[in-house]
Image (tube, rainbow, N blue to C red):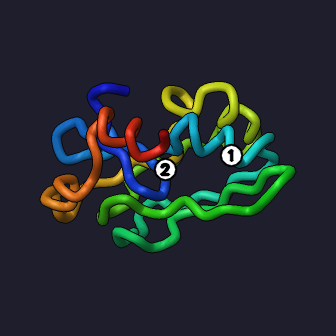
Amino acid sequence: MKNAKFSEDHEWVKVDGDIATIGITNHAQEQLGDVVFVELPEVGGTIAKGEDAGVIESVKAASELVAPVSGEVVETNGSLEDEPGSVNENPETTAWFIKVKLSDASELDGLMDYDAYQAFIA
């Protein structure tokens, strides 16, 4: 995850062109415990940085996926709704949540790099 950016809400963002893939960090899934339900936004809708972009429920708590960037949702990882536990197994790879067409790439500048995130969670 060295090439990703991280939010203080424990989401990660990987950018390819103007598409940002967003998920939660390994630290976040450890804090949540066993994930039992995931709700994702609608494709075609927009999300705004800092607003709720989905729901993650675990055996311990319910949490929100907080949008680390703004944009249009172009794809969701539908497999998470059928297999929410995959978030615990591969939170930083195959268990991504949404893909967003960035509306303001400068928002990425406010996110942490890998080393800063590691210091933040230490």
Depicted 81 relative to depicted 72: above or below: above
Q: Name the residue beneath numbered marker 2.
A: 10
Q: What element does badge 2 sit on?
A: loop
Circles 1 and 2 in contact, beta carbons < 8 Å: yes
The answer to whether residue 17 shows anywhere in this view is yes
Q: Residue 51: x percent and y percent?
A: 45, 73
The answer to whether residue 46 shows anywhere in this view is no
What whole-number distance in Å separates the C-alpha atoms at marks 1 and 2?
10 Å
Query: Crowding at label 1, few (<14), some or many (≥20) Cα neighbours within 10 Å?
Result: few
Q: Residue at x 57, y 34 (%)?
A: 26
Q: Residue at x 26, y 45 (%)?
A: 19
Q: Residue at x 41, y 46 (%)?
A: 120
Q: Nearer the viewer, residue 50 or 81?
A: 50
Q: Residue at x 28, y 47 (%)?
A: 112
Q: Quadrant of residue 35?
A: top right
Depicted 83 relative to depicted 51: above or below: above
Q: Amino acid at mark 1?
A: Gln
Q: Amino acid at mark 2?
A: His
Q: Residue 60: x percent and y percent?
A: 83, 54
The furthest residue to the left: 106
Q: Nearer the viewer, residue 22 or 114?
A: 114
User: Is 1 on the left-hand or right-hand side of 81?
Assistant: left
Q: Residue 93: x percent and y percent?
A: 49, 27
Q: What element does badge 1 sit on?
A: helix
User: Is 28 on the left-hand or right-hand side of 36?
Assistant: left
Depicted 34 relative to depicted 103: above or below: above
Res. 31 mark? 1
The N terminus sits in image quarter: top left
